[in-house]
């Protein structure tokens, strides 16, 4: 076996050769600069040292130890994982007592098991308020906050929010050991390329500092309805969950939550909840113990280029297309309709459908807001009094009442169409509430097939006009062709009544 020192020595000539090549390249560059008359380029570099910044904030960063005692029905089985905040790699390590301990009076198949998770957090109020990720604590019944100096404090949960993956804890500081708190900064001011540092508990190594830059903003990793992550290349790993991402002023501009990694370790792609999002949630958790989000009462989908053309949107694909309206929601009462495209909400531009849920949720319940929509090519403004989002499940959506369909068979857009008959309702299990024109066959070589339209689905609208028979469909298609449209927007309902917009290109 070769000692480590020898191994290092053995590699030195190669390193020196590399250095020589680098030096030669540098001289060549200098020569080229001299001949061209250009000034020597200044290479970008990071701060000379981050030690002072780390010293300033490290005491406010804590380790979180969360223990959960559960009952397992069979010995030797692996404990289920704690709830995860995202489909990406979790940033905290879980350790399970796989053997378990039998409780008093338990049958041989009933054993008490304890699982522990280790994560990170930070203190935002010297009175003892600590922030971490919801998935770090999960359903734990014993939570300890471990300070940088090793002091362990028992924590209680003030409130948690699985949608943003945040939790707020409270600890009681020791009288002679005041806590160090750190403030939130403005994540909206951060730009790709700005320097940041992450401090946390990676792989159980508490108080670990890493540095990097903001790689991107507004990342959607499809972990929930309000994704808006900061991406960073600062090294964050398992155990960093819930830890802070600092700017160069020592302010928290993000909360480390997930990483994208094929190895389980950092590959330079980490994600943090922006402080602009987190601070609003944290304030509500501290005040109410829960989050009270605004509710509009619509189901939406994104607007692509084909849909924008079919809708006659000026400026191309933008906004959020309303695909369903809750009968008892604020949108219905304010006159918003299926087919409207929301382009601005409460003064904020809606660039895509993913923007709207986040904007609505952050708007106070009961507030009257102006909503600008495009309806059949014309812009209009509606006033909406926001309700409160109580039910996380998708609300039941309204289906427009249509005249009874007449049985007939026609072809249009690569579709065989028929009026809805009792026999077709039974064959395709179409609900009685669904009205329109049923698709009985789809040409496999058509655009409709590419758009995943299937037999048994029902065409409710063509070009934002209701249809009740195959003749209505062909008539509307012919009219839109004469109008010079390059694509046609269909409102398509599933057999159960869920609707979506589909843009079909015209040849």
Image: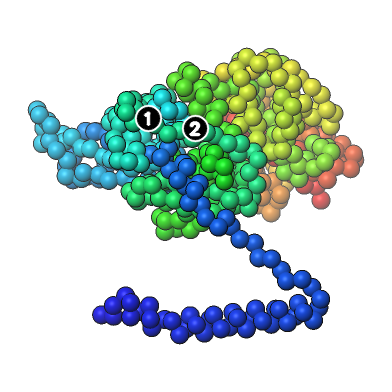
Task: Name above or below for residue 164 compared with residue 18.
Answer: above
Q: Position of residue 327 (x, y in %)?
A: 63, 17
Q: Residue 160: x, y in percent?
A: 43, 28
User: Left of 122 or right of it: where is 405?
Assistant: right
Residue at the spot 34% in from the left edge and 38% down from the top edge: 147
Whether residue 430 is situated above or below residue 417 in the rendered picture: above
Kindly tell me whether residue 468 is visible in this rendering.
no
Query: Foreground residue, 307 or 452?
Result: 307
**In the image, is 371 to the left or to the right of 434?**
right
Element class at badge 1:
loop
Quarter of the image where one finds residue 323: top right
Where does label 2 land, which residue?
Answer: 163
Q: How is the image coloured?
A: rainbow
Numbered label attached to residue 167: none
Q: Nearer the viewer, residue 50 or 452?
A: 50
Q: Is residue 184 visible?
A: yes
Q: Secondary structure at mark 2?
A: loop
Look at the image and tell me in which quarter the N terminus lies: bottom left
Coordinates of residue 106 in the picture (x, y in percent)? 12, 30
The residue under label 1 is 178
* Circles 2 and 1: CB atoms closer than 8 Å: no
Which of the two residues, 53 or 167, is positioned nearer the viewer here?
Answer: 53
Measured in 3D between alpha carbons, the distance from the residue under mark 2 to the one under mark 1, in whole angstroms, is: 32 Å
Give the image quarter of residue 40. Answer: bottom right
Q: How many marks?
A: 2
- Between circles 2 and 1, the one closer to the viewer is 1
Q: Residue at (9%, 28%) from the top-left corner? A: 105
């Amino acid at each position: 076996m070769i000692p480590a020192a020898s191994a290092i020595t053995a590699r030195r000539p190669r390193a020196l050769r590399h250095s020589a090549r680098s030096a030669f390249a540098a001289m060549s560059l200098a020569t080229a600069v001299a001949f061209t008359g250009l000034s020597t380029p200044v290479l970008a570099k990071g701060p000379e040292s981050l030690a002072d910044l780390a010293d300033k904030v490290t005491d406010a960063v804590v380790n979180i130890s969360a223990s959960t005692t559960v009952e397992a029905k069979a010995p030797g089985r692996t404990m289920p994982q704690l709830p995860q905040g995202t489909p990406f790699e979790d940033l905290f390590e879980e350790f399970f007592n796989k053997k378990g301990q039998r409780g008093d009076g338990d049958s041989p198949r009933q054993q008490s098991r304890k699982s522990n998770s280790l994560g990170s957090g930070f203190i935002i109020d010297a009175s003892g308020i600590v922030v971490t990720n919801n998935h770090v604590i999960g359903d734990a019944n014993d939570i300890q906050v471990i300070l940088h100096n090793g002091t362990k404090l028992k924590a209680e949960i003030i409130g948690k929010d699985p949608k943003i993956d945040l939790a707020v804890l409270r600890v009681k500081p020791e009288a002679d050991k005041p806590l160090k708190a750190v403030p939130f900064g403005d994540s909206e001011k951060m730009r790709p390329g700005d320097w940041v540092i992450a401090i946390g508990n990676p792989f159980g190594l508490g108080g670990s500092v890493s540095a990097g830059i903001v790689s991107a903003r507004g990342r959607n990793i499809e972990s929930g309805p309000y994704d808006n992550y900061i991406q960073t290349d600062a090294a964050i790993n398992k155990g960093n969950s819930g830890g802070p991402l600092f700017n160069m002023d020592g302010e928290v501009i993000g909360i480390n939550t997930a990483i994208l990694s094929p190895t389980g370790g950092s590959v330079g792609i980490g994600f943090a909840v922006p402080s602009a999002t987190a601070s609003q949630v944290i304030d509500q958790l501290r005040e109410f113990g829960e989050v009270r989000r605004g509710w509009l009462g619509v189901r939406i989908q994104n607007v692509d280029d084909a849909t924008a053309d079919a809708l006659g949107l000026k400026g191309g694909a933008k906004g959020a297309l309303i695909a369903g309206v809750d009968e008892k929601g604020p949108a219905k009462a304010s006159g918003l309709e299926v087919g409207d495209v929301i382009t601005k909400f409460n003064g904020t531009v809606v660039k895509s459908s993913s923007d709207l849920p986040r904007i609505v949720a952050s708007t106070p319940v009961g507030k009257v807001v102006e909503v600008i929509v495009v309806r059949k090519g014309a812009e209009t403004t509606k006033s909406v009094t926001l309700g409160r989002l109580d039910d996380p499940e998708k609300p039941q959506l309204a289906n427009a009442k249509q005249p009874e369909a007449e049985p007939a068979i026609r072809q249009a857009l690569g579709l065989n169409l028929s009026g809805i008959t009792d026999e077709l309702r039974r064959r395709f299990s179409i609900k009685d509430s669904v009205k329109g024109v049923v698709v009985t066959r789809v040409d496999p070589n058509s655009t409709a097939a590419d758009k995943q339209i299937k037999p048994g689905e029902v065409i409710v609208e063509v070009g934002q006009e209701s249809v009740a028979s195959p003749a209505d469909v062909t008539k509307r298609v012919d009219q839109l062709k004469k109008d010079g449209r390059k694509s046609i927007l269909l409102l398509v309902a599933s057999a159960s009544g869920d609707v979506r917009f589909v843009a079909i290109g015209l040849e």
